[in-house]
Image (cartoon, grey):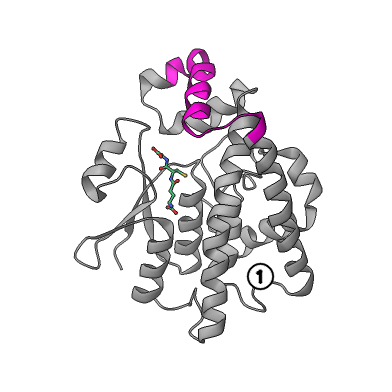
Amino acid sequence: MKPITLYQFEISHYSEKVRFLLDYKNIPYNKIDVLYGAGQKVVAKLTGQRQVPVIVDPNNRKRVVHDSTAIALYLDERYPDPPLIPREPDARAETLMLEDWLDHALGVVARRLFIWRMRGDNDFMRKTMEMNSDTLTRRLLPVMSPVLMKVLMLRDGINERSVADARVATETTLTILDNRLARAPYLTGDTPTLADFTAAGTAMLLQLPPHGYLRFPPDVAHGGVPEVQTAHKRFFEWKDKLYAKFRKKID
Ligand SMILES: N[C@@H](CCC(=O)N[C@@H](CS)C(=O)NCC(=O)O)C(=O)O
């Protein structure tokens, strides 16, 4: 099998979800780091929209798929073993519902909490963002980051109030996940499914993975939103175990 191409940001949690799926299915892939801004034009040309993750599959007439949910469905159909989404209708519906809910309930709110956390920490921001920046932006990052933060916060409506809402929403979501994981090893039972990899991927910004999975300096590992990590130790320990079991370390 030829490696799939993954257009991504290293710090993107929806890209992390896809990296998890590819690793779980043992599908080889090459990552292409898309530059913020200019690089997204390439993505727009390929897909008609500017967001990552995007995959291109050389084994299937260079098929292009964007959006982590569409990518999950594509991969499970094209590369069914091991399965991500159960075939039995009720289990299938539950997995897809959890996935859809987590994309929003964790993915969207985690980004809000992460950006809020980064706004006060230029060093952390630089370390996680410079990989997807061109040389000039990289050089400007230390000076520009407060401005960049303001732009991001305005664009995404991130302020005291929306962050307070995001904290409540995260608390509810992680409590539901904690309770499920107290009853079974995975969110829908005894075997991992798309729901688990969605939870682990979209929670990436609440707690970055252990060192060795992403191309960040060692001191960035497990960074994120400390108060959420402390309140939900069970979930974050489970997430680390999922990394150890299913996610491949980078060379
Ligand atoms: N629904 C999409 C969301 C993808 C998304 O939010 N991507 C972010 C990175 S995590 C992005 O590309 N942001 C750049 C932008 O919006 O310009 C998915 O599941 O793939």
* Relative side of 168 to 52, left or right: right
In the picture as drawn, the residue positioned furthest to the top comes out as: 143
Q: Residue at x 31, y 68 (%)?
A: 1
Q: Position of residue 246 (x, y in %)?
A: 57, 64
Q: Residues within 10 Å of mark 1 (few under 14, many from 20)?
A: many
Some atom of ligand 1 lies within 8 Å of the CB belonging to the residue at label 1: no
The three-letter amino acid code for the residue at tag 1 is Leu
Q: Position of residue 225 (x, y in %)?
A: 69, 39
Residues in magenta? 138-161
Question: Quick check: is 186 in the magenta stretch?
Answer: no
Which secondary structure class fits the magenta region best? helix
Q: Position of residue 233 (x, y in %)?
A: 79, 53
Quarter-of-image position of residue 226 = top right
In the picture as drawn, the residue positioned furthest to the front comes out as: 161
* Relative side of 232 to 99, left or right: right
- Residue 22 makes an appearance in the image: yes
Q: From the viewer's perspective, is residue 231 above or below residue 131?
A: below
Q: Residue at x 65, y 47 (%)?
A: 210
- Observer-nearest residue: 151 or 119? 151
Q: How many marks?
A: 1
Q: Provide the residue designation for mark 1.
A: 187
Q: Residue at x 36, y 76 (%)?
A: 77
Question: Quick check: is 152 in the magenta stretch?
Answer: yes
Q: From the viewer's perspective, is residue 219 above or below residue 26?
A: above
* Relative side of 55 to 183, left or right: left
